[in-house]
Amino acid sequence: DGSLESYELRDGLKQLGLECTDEEFDIVMARIDKDGGGDVSLKEFDRALKVAEKLPPKKKDKGPQKKIGLTDEDREEFRQIFCLFKQLCRQRASEASGDNDLELV
């Protein structure tokens, strides 16, 4: 439907190694989900990426530590996920309208 549900976003972040508590995730969602709908649209996600780019890069230090900000690799992976997501949405919309051609972005 053109957006990610909160559980989908949380699963994606977890797969990237960005695990957080329920409280931390609620704070993240409150900052990203500007319309309060409980999901993250492509526009909201893009805004969040731009803010994350301004965060300091993660520090390499001895011992375990949480990631701070997004690396270039993380950002590229998110971009690819959303490009695929957009393609799937367009494909579903064109199938619903009877046009079965998938346009690549």
Image: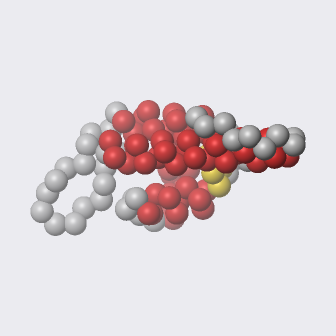
Judge whether residue 95 can be spotted in this image.
yes
Report the colour scheme. Answer: secondary structure
At x 31% / y 54%, what residue is drawn?
Answer: 67
Residue 36, can we see it? no
Where does the image place residue 69, in percent across and percent down from the top left? 34, 45
Looking at the picture, tell me which residue is in the foreground, 28 or 14.
Answer: 14
> Does residue 25 appear to the left or right of 63 in the view shown?
right
In this rendering, the count of numbered labels is 0
| Residue 94 spot, x, y in % from top left | 79, 41
Q: Position of residue 11 (x, y in %)?
A: 52, 63
Residue at 22% in and 66% down: 64
Vertical comparison of 81 with 11: above or below? above
| Quarter location, residue 86 | top right
Identify whether 32 is placed above or below 21: above
Please give the name of the residue rendered at 87% of the width and 43% of the height, measured from the top-left corner: 98
Residue found at x 19% / y 50%: 59
Quadrant in the picture for residue 41: top right
Depth order, front residue of 91/71: 91
The quarter of the picture where the C terminus appears is top right
Q: Is residue 25 left or right of residue 54?
A: right
Most foreground residue, 88 or 59: 88
Residue positioned most to the front: 101
Horizontal side of residue 1 vs 61, given as left or right:
right
